[in-house]
Structures are given as structure tokens and as C-alpha cells.
Image (tube, helix red, strand yellow):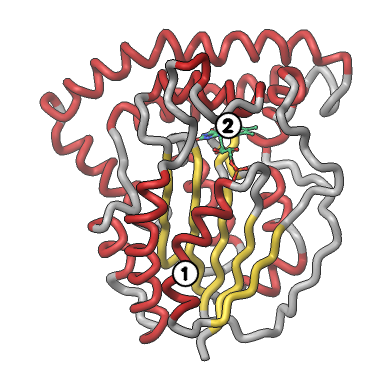
Amino acid sequence: MKRILVIYYTQTGQLKSALNSTLTPLEQAGVFIEYLHIKPKKAYPYPWSYIEFFDIFPETVHGSPTELEPFSINTEANYDLVVIAYQPWFLSICVPINSFLQTEEAKKLLKDKSVVTILACRNMWLNGQEKMKLQLKKLQAKLVGNITFVDKASNLVSLVTVLAFVLAGKKEKFMGVFPKYGVSDKDLRELAPQFGNILLKHIKTNDYNTQQEELVAAGAVIVKPNLLLMEGRGRDLFPLYANYISKKGKAGSTERRTRVRIFGIVLPTAILILSPIITIISRLAPILFPEKIKKQVDYYSQNELR
Ligand SMILES: Cc1cc2nc3c(=O)[nH]c(=O)nc-3n(C[C@H](O)[C@H](O)[C@H](O)COP(=O)(O)O)c2cc1C
């Protein structure tokens, strides 16, 4: 019997729904699946207050671990595959999963293991996944698949709906006009089981050589040029802002509150201003630099780290 360990974090449950829909075909085929829900010792608030949401930015970008609730895994168990399911936070790995990856248990468990990552997020996961590739490389694990579920609304629309979702707890039509935030039910119903069947086919033979290509062909990873360019800006600037805030004080301290507030205004404003400009550039870029854009899209669709 094949065995999978799924290590995941979810705050409001979206990622768990994506996992359920993806892994059902494997379960039905008799694959034994164990779940490990990683939880921070001090749960994050939902909805988040404005300050708490932006205050977690520096530690997320820096990859600083937080204390986790005790968990137990049999690090000697012979799992055929480990699934790591996480959300990107501020273009980085969310704190709970990043904290797990820095534990002794992760070191023992993941060495020489085949890993599939599954993400459910707004739409910006490229840099978070690069950080994940790096962590897995350090842990000597082999990334053999990546599946991403995103909100398919336009970038500006999902910026509004994600903020309404995390800061005000509104998932349904915000102000009556915006679409519901998140991964669509249609993707969970129609795409997720297809991804699951691809995982099933490969776990059966323990040969993952063509798995990612098949996942990409099925729509598990869609790299959009405008988001690629947006994330490039964030990747360069976020560490600078993170240092600017953390220099003033520790997580949650009053000393850094003004800087956190400034960042909380600057970030959405920058996305609002940059988004249309970058969308125009991204429409022109594939015409002006087709090779360069294609190379980038191909790079982010696969699992090696450059
Ligand atoms: C602190 C924080 C930062 C986030 N940053 C990003 C991000 O950089 N990119 C992205 O696509 N989504 C981002 N999101 C949205 C999450 O990926 C995800 O959609 C949301 O947290 C719901 O997931 P859950 O239901 O599994 O908890 C962020 C959410 C939080 C709470």
C-alpha cells in the first residue's frame, strides 16, 4: 500500500478544501493518507487587524520561525511521498510551514523524500515557491511536483477581495459587486481531481520524471507575465522594507508601529499604481522579448532551483 504524509497549514480552510479535492482520487484508489496540520502556538487572528496583518510582514520575509504547537510524526516511517501544502504570505512561505521546515523533525523526515507542493492562494506564489525550493534543497528533499490553486480574478479585483477577506472576514461578494474571494468551486470540482489522478499515476510507479510536465499541461501551474513582473518588484523591495520595520523593534512592539502603518499604506497603493502599468508592459513584453518571457515562464513552471 502506498503512503502519503500531508503536512499543511490553513487558517480559514481554503487550502484544506483544495487538498481534499486533489487527494480524493488517491484515497479512493487505496492510497493511505496521513494529515499533519501544523499550528502556531499562538493562533493568528481571523479576521486580522490591520496592524497585526502588516506587522507579520518582516518576520515572514526574513523567514523567522515562530513556536509551533507540539506535533508528532514518525520520522522513520516509509512514506512514498510527502505533500507540503502552504500559502504564500508576502511572497514568502507562510510562517507556520516555514517554522516547521526549520525543525529537527523536518530534517529527519524530508531527507531523500519525494515532495509535492500544493498551494492555494490569491495569485502571487512564484517567490514563495522559490524559497520553498531552496528550503527543500537544504533539507535534501526532491521536489517532484507543484500544484497551485489561485483566485483567477484580475489582479486588482483580487487585491480588493483578499483584503476584504483577511481584514474584514468577508468572503462572499464584497460590497455586493466584487466576486467571491479565492479559488473557484469549479477549479476544485473539475481541475483538482485531474491533478490527483496525475499524482496517483506517478506514485504507483514511483517514477516522477514526467509528473510536472503533465501537471502543467493539466493547468496546475499557470505563470502570468504581469504577475511575474509584479513579483519581481516585490522580491527586490520587500527585504528592504522588512529591514526598515524590524530595525525599529521586535514583532508586535509599539516602537515599530508607525513604520508598520506606513508599509500598510504603501503596499496596497504601490500595487494599485503599478498593476495597470505592469499589465501594459507585460502585454508588450512577450512581443518585444518573446524569448526572455518564455524562458521565465518555463523556469517557474518546473521544479529545479536556478
Ligand atoms: C499575512 C498574509 C499574507 C498573504 N500574502 C499573500 C501573497 O503574497 N500572495 C498570495 O497569493 N496570497 C497571499 N495571501 C492570501 C493567502 O495565500 C490565502 O489565500 C489566504 O490566507 C486563505 O488561505 P487559507 O484559507 O488556507 O487559510 C496572504 C494571506 C495572509 C493572511
- Residue at position x 48%, y 22% in the image: 159
Closer to the camera in the image, 39 or 175: 175
Q: Nearer the viewer, mark 1 or mark 2?
A: 1
Q: Where is residue 276 drawn, in percent x and y?
A: 33, 13
**Disc 2 crowd, CA 10 A, few/some/many (<14, 14-19, 20+):** many
Most distant residue in the bottom direction? 1
Closer to the camera in the image, 230 or 81: 81
Most distant residue in the right direction? 254
Q: Is residue 136 left or right of residue 72?
A: left
- Residue at position x 50%, y 46% in the image: 120
- Residue at position x 49%, y 85% in the image: 30
| Label 1 or label 2, whichever comes before in sequence order | 1
Q: Secondary structure at mark 1?
A: helix
Q: Mark 2 = which residue?
A: 90
- Residue 222 appears in which quarter of the rendering? top left
- Residue 156 appears in which quarter of the rendering? top left
Q: Is residue 180 above or below residue 278?
A: below
Q: Where is residue 72 drawn, in percent x and y?
A: 80, 71
Q: Where is residue 107 drawn, in percent x and y?
A: 69, 68
- Residue 51 appears in which quarter of the rendering? top right
Q: Amino acid at mark 2?
A: Phe
Per the rendering, the mark at residue 24 is: 1
Whether tag 1 and tag 2 are in contact, CB under 8 A, the answer is: no
Q: Is residue 8 above or below residue 122?
A: below
Q: Is residue 143 left or right of residue 73?
A: left
**Disc 1 crowd, CA 10 A, few/some/many (<14, 14-19, 20+):** some
Most distant residue in the left direction? 287
Q: Is residue 173 above or below residue 135?
A: above
Q: Secondary structure at mark 2?
A: loop
Q: Amino acid at mark 1?
A: Thr
Quadrant hosting ligand 1 = top right
Judge: label 2 CB < 8 Å from ligand 1.
Answer: yes
